[in-house]
Amino acid sequence: MRLASVRHLGTEVPALVDARRGVVRVADLVPGFSGDALSILVDGRWAELEKLAADAPDRVFADRESVEFGAPYRHPRLIWGIGLNYVDHAADLSEQVPDEPASFVKGDHTVIGPGEPIPVPPQSSRTTAEAEVALVIGRHCRNVSEADALDHVAGVVAVLDQTAEDILERNPRFLTRSKNFPGFFSFGPEIVPLAELPDLAELEVSTVLNGQEHRTNTVARMRYSPAFLVSFHSAVMPLQPGDILSTGTPGAAHIRPGDTAECRIPGVGVLTNPVIQG
């Protein structure tokens, strides 16, 4: 059962999504619940809520198409991003995949959810949108082995990661600035538990612009696997429940005001955002 947030009475509230029965708000399973989806991850309550949802009557569920999804949560403690992780993407840019993961950190001010506009900042004449699959950490993770790394992952989620590419091209030291404008990290609509995915390596990630597939690749074509990335970054710093590790893009699309950017991952979801002038 998937974890999400839905818009209700002018706010966003956590919900579970069942493929057969639809969407149920957590407050309808736990009367008086006032936390967000991040608190569910931090408190380790996802499995408990799944059991409550399984026992709940059909009347508390809404049809998935009748609800509006927001960002799963608005204030992740940490967002790690990875650059140049698909071998083919690096080749497209006439660059080599680095000998170690090329990672960067984004602030929570960059977070938006499905359907919210991506603002192109006035400082940039070339902003790109990059579809990615991200890992959501499920429990404390420090110095874990690659073999054990995915045991610490709660699930995966679709991402659109934006870059002010022209700023980055001026100097690679400008990576943090080029990645941290408001609206430069969209994720959702649902966090999909790993148990729902038969093989993480077979996931297909597509950057889509205005309905046209721009670039597609599979997780198996990553230079650094999801398990390796979790292990590697857990040796840098502790990873905590709700932290997000976005694993890199198969290809970036130049976006302009009026465009619509999408991340499509069969089995995970479709994330769509319009583009406006910031």
Image (tube, helix red, strand yellow):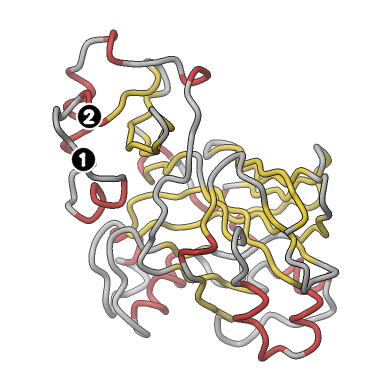
| Relative image position of residue 210 (x, y in whole percent) | 82, 41
Amino acid type at circle 1 is Ser
Q: How crowded is the residue under tag 1: few (<14 C-alpha within 10 Å), some, or many (20+)?
A: few
- Residue 34, numbered circle: 1
* Residue 89 locus on image (x, y percent): 75, 67
The crowd level at tag 2 (other Cα within 10 Å; few <14, some 14-19, many 20+) is some
Instruction: Identify the residue position indicated by label 2 in the image.
Output: 27
Residue 130, above or below 89: above
Query: Does label 2 or label 1 sit earlier along the sequence?
Result: 2
At a point 24% along the width and 61% down the height, the residue shown is: 139
For image coordinates 28% across by 80% down, the residue present is 143
Estimate the spatial distance between the alpha carbons at disc 2 and disc 1, rounded to whole Å.
7 Å
Quarter-of-image position of residue 12: top left
> Which of these two is toward me, 158 or 123?
123
Q: Disc 2 on helix, strand or loop?
A: helix
Q: Nearer the viewer, residue 5 or 49?
A: 5
Quadrant in the picture for the N terminus: top left
Question: CB atoms at circles 2 and 1 under 8 Å apart?
Answer: yes
Q: Nearer the viewer, residue 213 or 77?
A: 77
Check the picture and name the quadrant holding the C terminus: bottom right
* Vertical position of residue 165 compared to residue 23: above or below: below
Residue appearing at x 62%, y 62% in the figure = 184
x%, y% of residue 9?
38, 28
Residue 166 is left or right of residue 220, and the answer is right
Type of the residue with mark 2:
Ala
As drawn, 49 above or below 244: above
Residue sitting nearer the eye, 108 or 129 = 108
Does 240 appear above or below 34? Answer: below
Q: Position of residue 59 (x, y in %)?
A: 28, 8
In screen coordinates, is 158 left or right of 56? right
Residue name at image x 49 percent, y 50 percent: 200
Q: At numbered mark 1, what does the secondary structure look like: helix, strand or loop?
A: loop
